[in-house]
Image: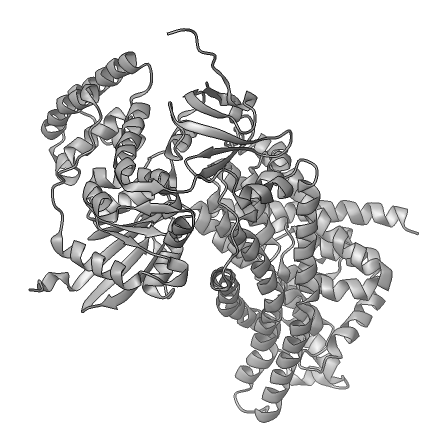
Amino acid sequence: MMDDKLRKITVALAGNPNSGKTSVFNMLTGARHHVANYPGTTVEMKQAYCNHNGFRITFVDLPGAYGLNALSSEELVARNFIIYEKPDVVVNVIDSSNVERNLYLTTQLIEIHVPLVLAFNMSDVARRQGILFDTDRLSSLLEAPIVPTVANKAEGRLKLLDAIVSVAGAGRKPRTHRITYGDEIEKALSQIEPLIISEHPGLAAGYDPRWVSLKLIEQDGDILSKIQGRKLIDSVNDAVAALKAIFGDDPEVIIADKRYGFISGACQETVKTTVELRHTTSDLADAVLTHRILGLPIFLLLMYLVFYLTFTVAAYPMVWLEQFFGWLSALLASIWPPDSVNWLRSMLIDGVIPGVGGILVFLPNILILFLAIAVLEDSGYMARAAFIMDSLMHRIGLHGKSFIPMLIGFGCSVPAIMATRILENRRSRFTTIMVLPLMSCGARLTIYGLLIPAFFPHNWRGPVLWLVYLTGIVLAVVAAKILRLTIFRGETADFVMELPPYRVPTIKSILTHTWIRGWMYLKKAGTIILAFSIILWAAMNYPKLGEKSFVDLSPDQIQQAKLANSFIGRLGRAIEPAIKPLGFDWKIGTALIGATPAKELFVSQLGIIYAVSSHDDSGAIPTLRSHLQADYSPLVGFCIMLFCLISSPCVATAAVTRSETGSWRWAMLQFFSLTALGYIVTLAVYQIGKLIIP
Amino acid sequence: MGTTSTKILSQVDEGEMVSVVSVYGGRGLRNRLTAMGLLPKSQIRVVRNGGRGPFVISIKNLRIALGRGVADKIMVM
């Protein structure tokens, strides 16, 4: 008999990182997910739903966690979600080849009394390693159904959904197999429980008192902050001191030990390994890839390969896209008569298409970079790379894992800043976020692509490009060091990182990971750049000049004059005195202002300033280059690139910084200090350069 | 019970199997290690103890890389 209220079910997915939780999420929901924030936090939460047997099941993907400890912000978020939002079912995704360690989280879920379904994922790997499970017995010991799955091949989906529905229907039941913590701790628990009920009845109603007392003895920061009753606090302190004296160690260690004891006991009867694996192929691969001498060169070679692919292979589709947008502009210009709704026509042809087209042209470039990174991550190499980088990173005060977001930053800062979530240490993370924009992103590449061929002969072009990137990296290192010695002072977290075994990534997983990040880049185009292209177009075209000012001028000159009169033109002139020491004039100033929302706009801005219409054929860019060459020296060209590299990260970057750090304070600090840094460095380079170069 | 020699994990040779005695360090580090299965009496095997590469241990089929002196903070025997 179906109960009416069961038509909707909420399910939370919990599990260790690397357990394939995301694959299970995607398998259940089809990867059409919706992102929101966990209530009351800035942590992002993935949510999606599917329909099964007349039920609408909503899935929430909790952050990967090894346990439910208050000390880790992600684990606390997961824990609080389960306790406060009370999902109907928690699906605990378990890496079947690592059951004992994965079950540690399970024991903590059991302690909270949530209805559980265990998805024994990667069951194909376990089978290959010769691990056998007595699923029925284990399931009854853990009091949760066990469903073997191979999420990246979509095996086990229906059985998992059936299990979810049946567990949801049964609701919360009292457990028969409780985890016990030994006489001494049990005694302490029994003394503390009644005090919780008497002194904090509200707390006892929302949480299980036994669980609360357990957390108090573990000295869990989050729960401790919720109690004030004097008798309770004293009782807890006494119990902790007594237990410390008996065991010679903190109670939390003993409790952890008991949990593992429970797991051991359960697994001893139910998990059999038939093959003792001592030297896996992973170890052999690691012997080479993290070799004390070969490791670093191999790593550098791989990095070089990644960037080589990004710049050369992507070149072809980029040219096609450029031509496409040129064609699109021309088409629109020809079929839309110039006198009907002229402002809309102009807005589209002069504003939207160059603005948005400019960023879409870079999509192949960025997608290839993200593809390469996805391959490195999914194969397991990234963990090793993070380690290889760690000794270097540590010297500037960063964690080896910072390397991964920085690598992504060469594509686009937006997904890179989001990737800093893998850093647990807040100070390391914030430092990385602050200096990330110095990793020259794909957008800035448009600027280099315009300026370098304009000012430098053929043989110089490669080295100059490389020099620009290198400058960004060096500055990032210096800035990080300074930040870590001043505002983000503190110890770097110790390096403890799981090394997953190497595996051949599936095409599906690589494409999914590439697409997720590529999509962020596209969203940036669709939203911010579109909006600002329109705003910029308005700032460039208004206020308008009266018709009588146009006597005896060519169409290009007319456009130039219009620009000079517009809001942006005036702004550009106004800041000219400030940027003259850098070798810039009002034209560059105007383009720079125009590029603030998104760096790609710099090129289209310059194009308009020099009255080279953007809806020309592909002769536009070379023409623009010759104009630039005539007006500026290579030194100035280089300085422009430097300034663009360092200063004013784009609006999208500022927005993501704000959401990842939780306040505008950091985003503003990032914006203004990078701009100031850019000014100083460019100033120095220009002034010194003027003296040195004849 | 006679005196058993406890030593620092970083002094253990590759391939050797040891038992954890204690972990020195902040609660953050200890909790992380605990959640990954490294607590007193756990059996761990040293997979790599190289000069420049990561210090890698194996706990129950799981490989963990330790760096930056973490291996110096773990007492084993």
The residue drawn where x is 58% and y is 42% is: A284
Answer with left or right where residue A66 lies relative to residue A346. left
Q: Position of residue A463 (x, y in %)?
A: 80, 55
User: Residue at left 40%, top 47%?
Assistant: A130
Q: Quadrant of residue A612?
A: bottom right
Which quadrant holds residue A106?
A: top left
Please state, as top left, top right, bottom left or bottom right, where the N terminus of chain A lies in the image: bottom left
Outermost top residue:
B2
The colour scheme is one colour
Task: Judge whether residue B71 can be spotted in this image.
Answer: yes
Q: Among all residues in the image, which is located at the extreme right?
A: A694
x then y, percent, for residue A294: 69, 41
Q: Residue at x 38, y 64 (%)?
A: A31
Q: Position of residue A529 (x, y in %)?
A: 54, 67
Q: Quadrant of residue B26?
A: top left
Residue at the extreme front of the image, as rendered: A274
Instruction: Give the vertical position of A100 relative to A607 (above or below).
Output: above
Depth check: give the residue in front, A451 or A250.
Answer: A250
Is the residue A298 above or below the residue A177 in the image?
below
Of A161 and A344, the residue lying toward us: A161
Residue A671 seen anywhere in this rendered image of the structure: no
Q: Is residue A318 above or below residue A616?
A: above
The residue located at (31%, 25%) in the rendering is A252
Query: As displayed, is residue A185 above or below residue A314?
Result: above
Q: How many marks?
A: 0
Q: Position of residue A151 (x, y in %)?
A: 37, 58
For residue A314, side relative to residue A193 (left or right): right
